[in-house]
Amino acid sequence: MNWLSPAHMLFFGVVALLLFGNRLPEIARSLGRAINEFKKGLSDVQRDINRAGQESDTPPQRLNPPDATQAPADVNPATSREEQHVR
C-alpha cells in the first residue's frame, strides 16, 4: 500500500515542469538555501543550549562581603535604625 510510487513521483515531476518551467532551478536553489539556513539556525540553538548547560555546571562565584568599616554613602552612621525608618 505504497501511495507514493515512482509513477506518482514522475507525474508530479511532469506537472511541476509544466507549471514552473524554467523557474524550477531557481525555486530549487532557493529551497536549498532555506534548508541550509534552517540547519544553521538549529546548530546555533544547539550550541547555545550546550553552552548554557556547561555554564550551569560551573559553581557560582562567591562575592567578597563588603568591608564592615565602610558605611554606604546614603547612610549616616550616627543615626539609629529607628530614625532611618521614620525618614
Image (cartoon, rainbow, N blue to C red):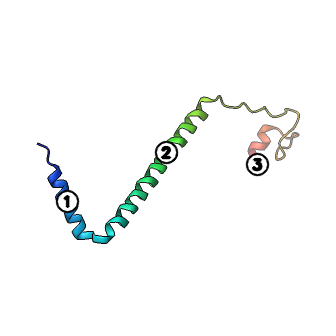
Q: Amino acid at mark 1?
A: Phe
Report the residue at 40% width, 54% height from top.
35
Read off the residue under disc 2.
43
Residue 12 x/y as whole percent: 20, 59
Read off the residue under disc 1.
12
Residue located farthest toward the left when viewing the structure as drawn = 1
Q: Nearer the viewer, residue 63 or 85?
A: 63
Relative to 24, is 41 above or below? above
Q: Earlier in the sequence, mark 3 or mark 1?
A: 1
Q: Nearer the viewer, residue 67 or 77?
A: 67
Residue 63 x/y as whole percent: 75, 33
Read off the residue under disc 3.
87
Secondary structure found at label 2: helix
Secondary structure found at label 1: helix
Residue 11 x/y as whole percent: 16, 59
Relative to 26, is 7 above or below? above
Q: Amino acid at mark 2?
A: Ser
- Mark 2 and mark 1: Cα distance apart in space: 33 Å
As drawn, is 40 to the left or to the right of 19? right
- Mark 3 and mark 1: Cα distance apart in space: 81 Å
Q: Amino acid at mark 3?
A: Arg
As drawn, is 75 to the left or to the right of 14? right
Question: In the image, which disc is placed on residue 66?
Answer: none
Report the residue at 19% width, 57% height from top.
10
Report the residue at 40% width, 57% height from top.
32
